[in-house]
């Protein structure tokens, strides 16, 4: 597949041919990366720029944006999200709705109302989630690049499972305007690409202050791509207690990455962080509390498919019980519980205090290091059905969620393949608003390990 950097150099005729070829390949694909197959009319109506797959949670004008939930089927977006506006202005265009876990709540893209997404490396294994469609499309050669959203690792984890690059920006770097909210203080749009340089290019396009988003950071922005430098020598911390919990395949890939970084001239230091069980508890309390508030609007009155004929109460019950899937209902109920009278202080306030501790721990590490190297997930992509309970699924996020709680930037990239041919991905974590150092380190690691697709 042509890279984003290469595609941006194409003339209009070549771009049209690229779009036609992609539409044909998408029709023939069987991995469920998209929620709808593209037709010839889509090639022209979605614009004429370089085609970018869009997670079905980002509003695109005149598209049926559903967040892969039955409750939003039939909703037509009346406007473009700011990231879509930025794409169009840069000569790119949205091209196809990428599959996802319903309302971004999941780690395997199998809670979608359209069906599951399969991993291109092994269709019996998950592509990860919630941005599994975006990652699988890029890995499967049916997208030049894609946009996903990352609430607790939802770009980085599927990128790691699928052997592509996934980047989560600093909270506030990329506008959330027009992106359906899961957890408002955690969500960020991020690029999914074939390599680190493409991720930097797409990040530069979508980032920047947006007055339409109250959480958008009003700070100076400088383009990352022109100053990419893989030769910058950095101090990189490794979190030993994180690595201890990983599978043998992840540990092997981690050792390879550390050795490659040392041979490239970087300095490695060893650190520990707060126990992952405390991080996990804090994240799911904060995330579900915010989700319960954000999803309360889907009541059949203003949004969503209206169900029930027995009055207002019956309409609320039927609309939500039929519209939301099981995992979404679980998280709404948990969020409502931790925000309820008598439990707010015991759970929500305590979780916010732990969140502050996590941020402090990261700041302490960054006083002695430029970047942090960490696993993305405890294992490579698991087979479907591996997670028997929601809690088991939540544990697959133990290495990624702390980044969102602290609002930091991070990037996942493939290191090698395990003995079954599945990608092993690791992540680099950077200081807030220091995406330049993050991309420099990622480019150096990418060159050093020389991952073979």
Image: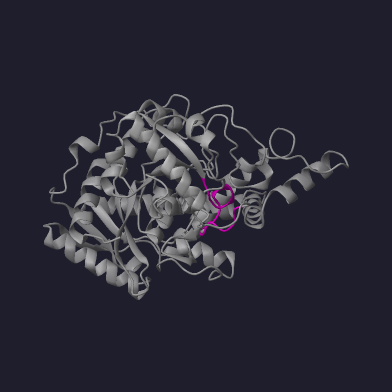
In reply to whether residue 111 is colored magenta, the answer given is yes
Q: Is residue 329 left or right of residue 174?
A: right
Q: Which residues are magenta?
A: 98-112
Tell me what residue is drawn at x 74 percent, y 38 percent: 300
> Do we see residue 151 in this rendering?
no
Q: Which of the pair 306/341 is nearer the observer?
A: 306
Q: Position of residue 70 (x, y in %)?
A: 67, 47
Q: Position of residue 291 (x, y in %)?
A: 59, 46
Quadrant in which the C terminus is drawn: bottom left
Q: Position of residue 133 (x, y in %)?
A: 48, 51
Q: Which of the pair 249/16 is nearer the observer?
A: 16
Number of on-image labels: 0
**Predominant SS of the magenta segment:** loop
Furthest residue in direction right, as rendered: 310
Q: Position of residue 441 (x, y in %)?
A: 21, 50
Tell me what residue is drawn at x 53 percent, y 67 percent: 384
Q: Is residue 210 left or right of residue 5?
A: right
Q: Is residue 20 above or below residue 337?
A: above
Q: How was the colour assigned to the protein in this rendering?
A: one colour
Instruction: Tell me the quarter of the picture where residue 170 sits.
Output: top left
Tell me what residue is drawn at x 58 percent, y 47 percent: 103
Instruction: Tell me the quarter of the picture where residue 375 sits.
Output: bottom left
Q: Which of the pair 264/369 is nearer the observer?
A: 264
Instruction: Tell me the quarter of the picture where residue 221 sits.
Output: top left
Q: Is residue 343 above or below residue 418?
A: above
> Do we see residue 180 in this rendering?
yes
Q: Which of the pair 168/334 is nearer the observer?
A: 168
In reply to whether residue 72 is colored magenta, the answer given is no
């Amino acid at each position: 597949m042509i890279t984003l950097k290469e595609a941006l150099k194409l003339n209009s005729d070549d771009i049209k041919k690229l779009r036609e070829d992609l539409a044909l390949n998408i029709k023939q694909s069987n991995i469920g990366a998209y929620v709808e197959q593209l037709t010839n009319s889509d090639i022209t109506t979605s614009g004429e720029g370089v085609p970018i797959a869009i997670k079905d949670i980002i509003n695109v004008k005149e598209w049926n944006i559903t967040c892969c939930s039955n409750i939003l089927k039939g909703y037509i977006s009346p406007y473009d999200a700011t990231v879509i506006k930025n794409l169009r202005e840069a000569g790119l265009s949205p091209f196809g709705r990428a599959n996802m876990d319903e309302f971004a709540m999941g780690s395997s893209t199998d809670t979608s109302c359209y069906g599951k997404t399969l991993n291109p490396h092994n269709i019996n294994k998950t592509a990860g989630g919630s941005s599994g469609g975006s990652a699988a499309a890029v890995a499967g050669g049916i997208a030049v690049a894609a946009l996903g959203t990352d609430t607790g690792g939802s770009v980085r984890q599927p990128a790691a499972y699928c052997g592509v690059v996934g980047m989560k920006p600093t909270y506030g770097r990329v506008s959330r305007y027009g992106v359906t909210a899961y957890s408002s203080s955690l969500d960020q749009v991020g690029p999914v690409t074939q390599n680190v340089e493409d991720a930097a290019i797409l990040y530069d396009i979508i980032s920047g202050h947006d007055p339409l988003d109250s959480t958008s950071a009003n700070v100076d922005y400088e383009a990352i791509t022109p100053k990419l430098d893989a030769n910058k020598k950095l101090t990189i911390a490794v979190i030993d207690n994180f690595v201890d919990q990983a599978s043998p395949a992840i540990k092997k890939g981690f050792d390879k990455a550390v050795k490659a970084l040392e041979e490239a001239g970087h300095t490695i230091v060893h650190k520990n962080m707060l126990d992952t069980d405390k991080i996990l508890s804090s994240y799911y309390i904060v995330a579900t509390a915010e989700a319960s508030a954000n999803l309360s609007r889907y009541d059949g009155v203003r949004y969503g498919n209206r169900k029930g004929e027995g009055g207002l109460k019956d309409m609320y019950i039927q609309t939500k019980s039929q519209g939301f899937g099981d995992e979404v209902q679980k998280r709404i109920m948990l969020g409502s519980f931790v925000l309820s009278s008598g439990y707010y202080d015991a759970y929500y306030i305590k979780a916010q205090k732990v969140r502050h501790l996590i941020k402090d721990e990261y700041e302490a590490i960054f006083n002695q290091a430029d970047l942090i190297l960490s696993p993305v997930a405890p294992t490579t992509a698991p087979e479907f059905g591996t997670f028997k309970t929601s809690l088991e699924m939540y544990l697959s996020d133990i290495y990624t969620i702390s980044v969102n709680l602290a609002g930091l930037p991070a990037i996942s990239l493939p290191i090698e393949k395990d003995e079954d041919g599945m990608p092993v991905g690791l992540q680099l974590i950077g200081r807030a608003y220091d995406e330049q150092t993050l991309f420099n380190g990622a480019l150096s690691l990418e060159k050093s390990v020389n991952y073979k697709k």
